[in-house]
């Protein structure tokens, strides 16, 4: 066997071994962190539901989990997924919270949206997941944007950023992020249609 062939085999063997070690380490790291990632995602959802329900959020993860267990009835089979939030002391319904999705510029946007107990007006919005452009579409995570539909009824139309209209059907778009803004508008209007259909079906 000539020297070049031996060198090639040695290099190939080294690269194969190195690849195997890296894959093993990455797989082990993923297995070790999966439970923590799932736990953090659940906590993030619970805290978002707390916020859009109008309940002052807690920084203590154990307190949030305890609140969720005592106060929230989940209906994952509903379309869209619905969470009914109650006062744990009186049993009074405080809010209806829904998960919804819309297609932004770079992928799905996932959010939770709060509504009043009768599902006639909105509370706030919290973004759970998005891949929009930093400084543009990703601004949907800014507090002013997520608060602006509170107390409004929709269906929504977009107005230029900075309008801050108090009209019940208008929300500010984000300058330079037309597709992302339209995705949020369509998400909210779709939720309105779904809740109206559910209300009609319950009669």
Image: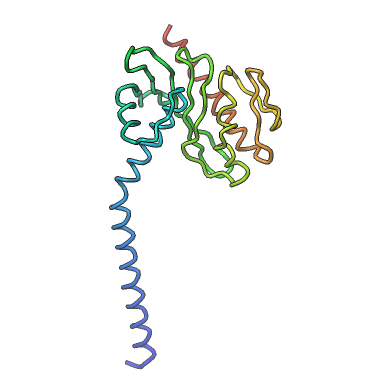
Give the residue drawn at x 36%, y 36%.
43
Q: With respect to residue 122, does 162 lie above or below?
A: below
**Residue at position x 40%, y 37% from top?**
44
Which sits in the foreground, 74 or 55?
Answer: 55
Q: Residue furthest bottom?
A: 2
Outermost residue toward the top in this view: 203
Query: How is the model colour-coded?
Result: rainbow
Task: Please determine whether, in this image, residue 170 is positioned above or below residue 29.
Answer: above
Q: Position of residue 18 (x, y in %)?
A: 34, 72
* Nearer to me, 156 or 49: 49
Q: Position of residue 126 (x, y in %)?
A: 49, 32
Coordinates of residue 193 in the picture (x, y in percent): 53, 19
Report which quarter residue 99 is drawn in: top left
Kindly identify the residue that appears in the image at 31 percent across and 50 percent down: 33
Where's the C terminus, which quadrant?
top left
Q: Does residue 24 appear to the left or right of 97 in the view shown?
A: left
Q: Is residue 174 left or right of residue 29?
A: right
Q: Relative to the observer, which residue lies in front, 16 or 68?
A: 68
> Number of labelled discs?
0
Query: Which image quarter holds the N terminus?
Result: bottom left
In x, y percent, where is residue 138?
A: 57, 42
**Which residue does the image show at 70% across and 31% down from the upper left?**
162
């Amino acid at each position: 066997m000539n020297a070049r062939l031996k060198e090639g085999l040695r290099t190939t063997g080294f690269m194969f071994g190195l690849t195997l070690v890296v894959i093993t380490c990455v797989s082990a790291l993923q297995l070790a962190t999966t439970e923590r990632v799932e736990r953090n995602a659940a906590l993030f959802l619970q805290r978002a539901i707390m916020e859009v329900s109008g309940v002052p959020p807690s920084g203590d993860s154990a307190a949030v989990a305890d609140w969720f267990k005592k106060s929230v009835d989940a209906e994952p089979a509903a379309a869209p997924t619905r969470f009914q939030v109650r006062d744990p002391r009186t049993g009074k319904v405080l809010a209806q919270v829904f998960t919804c999705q819309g297609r932004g510029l770079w992928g799905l946007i996932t959010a939770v949206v709060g509504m009043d107990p009768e599902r006639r007006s909105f509370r706030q919005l919290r973004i759970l997941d998005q891949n929009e452009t930093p400084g543009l579409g990703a601004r949907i995570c800014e507090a002013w944007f997520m608060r602006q539909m509170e107390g409004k009824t929709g269906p929504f139309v977009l107005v230029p950023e900075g309008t801050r209209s108090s009209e019940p059907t208008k929300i500010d778009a984000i300058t330079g992020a037309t597709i992302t803004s339209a995705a949020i508008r369509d998400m909210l209007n779709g939720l309105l249609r779904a809740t109206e259909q559910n209300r009609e079906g319950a009669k």
